Image (tube, grey):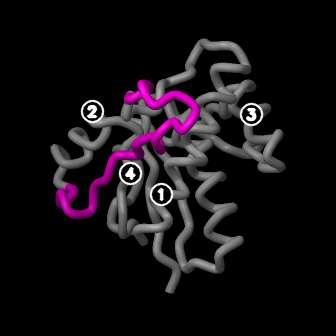
């Protein structure tokens, strides 16, 4: 049976949708029995992904054109085996609504080999930023998702 992971960010227009399609492409590539979906703790329902998020993942051959935002309280949380917040605050919210701590993780950036002094663990929200901000976010998510998949 296919196991499901839910990526959770704030508005469900940038980080969590990018994490969803990136995770799904790696999971398919590796033949894993996992699939991802996403939602936002402050999402307004049924909005598209941000245009720069769509462009950033298109550069990897991935498609976010059909994405529609989902507000976390409207999602059936019983469907998921794992919940991944895009920062500590998202993980705290998941635990506060009753998700067992052992099922909640935070998507942390992989270490930055190019800059050993860049120690920020969080994947920075690119909302409102230019395409380069979204590319940086996308690349951080790619590295973080590879680490996450290695632990499944």
Q: Nearer the viewer, residue 32 or 36?
A: 32
Mark linked to residue 48: none
Other-residue count near label 4 (Cα within 10 Å), few / some / many at <14 / 14–19 / ≥20 = many
Image coordinates of residue 46 in percent, x first then y, are 60, 37
Mark linked to residue 147: 1
Q: Is residue 135 left or right of residue 137?
A: right
> Which stretch appears magenta?
99-119
User: Disc 4 designates what residue?
Assistant: 84
Image coordinates of residue 86 in percent, x first then y, are 41, 39
Q: Is residue 148 left or right of residue 90?
A: right
Mark linked to residue 89: 2
Task: Compute the Cα span from label 2 to label 1.
Answer: 20 Å
Among the two numbered marks 4 and 3 on one chain, the one whose residue lies closer to the N terminus: 3
Other-residue count near label 2 (Cα within 10 Å), few / some / many at <14 / 14–19 / ≥20 = some
| Secondary structure found at label 4 | strand
Among the two numbered marks 3 and 1 on one chain, the one whose residue lies closer to the N terminus: 3
Residue at position x 68%, y 71% from top? Answer: 28
Mark linked to residue 56: 3
| Residue 36 in sight in this render | yes
Q: Is residue 101 above or below residue 42?
A: below
Residue at position x 81%, y 41% from top? Answer: 58
Name the image quarter holding residue 92.
top left
Other-residue count near label 1 (Cα within 10 Å), few / some / many at <14 / 14–19 / ≥20 = some
Task: Compute the Cα span from label 1 to label 4.
Answer: 13 Å
Among the two numbered marks 2 and 4 on one chain, the one whose residue lies closer to the N terminus: 4
Among the two numbered marks 2 and 1 on one chain, the one whose residue lies closer to the N terminus: 2
Determine contact: label 1, label 4, CB under 8 Å: no
| Secondary structure found at label 1 | helix
Viewer-side label of 1, 4: 1
| Secondary structure found at label 3 | helix
Task: Compute the Cα span from label 4 to label 3.
Answer: 21 Å
Image coordinates of residue 123 in percent, x first then y, are 46, 32
């Amino acid at each position: 049976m296919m196991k499901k992971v839910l990526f959770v960010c704030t508005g469900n227009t940038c980080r969590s949708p990018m994490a969803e399609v990136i995770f799904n492409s790696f999971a398919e590539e590796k033949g894993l029995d996992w699939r991802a979906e996403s939602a936002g703790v402050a999402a307004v329902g049924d909005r598209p992904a941000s245009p720069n998020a769509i462009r950033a993942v298109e550069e990897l051959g991935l498609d976010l054109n059909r994405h529609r935002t989902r507000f976390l309280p409207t999602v059936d949380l019983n469907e998921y085996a794992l919940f991944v917040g895009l920062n500590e605050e998202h993980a705290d919210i998941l635990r506060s609504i009753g998700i067992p701590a052992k099922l909640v993780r935070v998507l942390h950036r992989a270490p930055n080999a190019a800059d050993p002094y860049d120690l920020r663990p969080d994947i920075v929200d690119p909302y409102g930023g230019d395409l380069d901000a979204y590319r940086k976010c996308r690349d951080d998510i790619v590295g973080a998702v590879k680490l996450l998949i290695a632990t499944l």
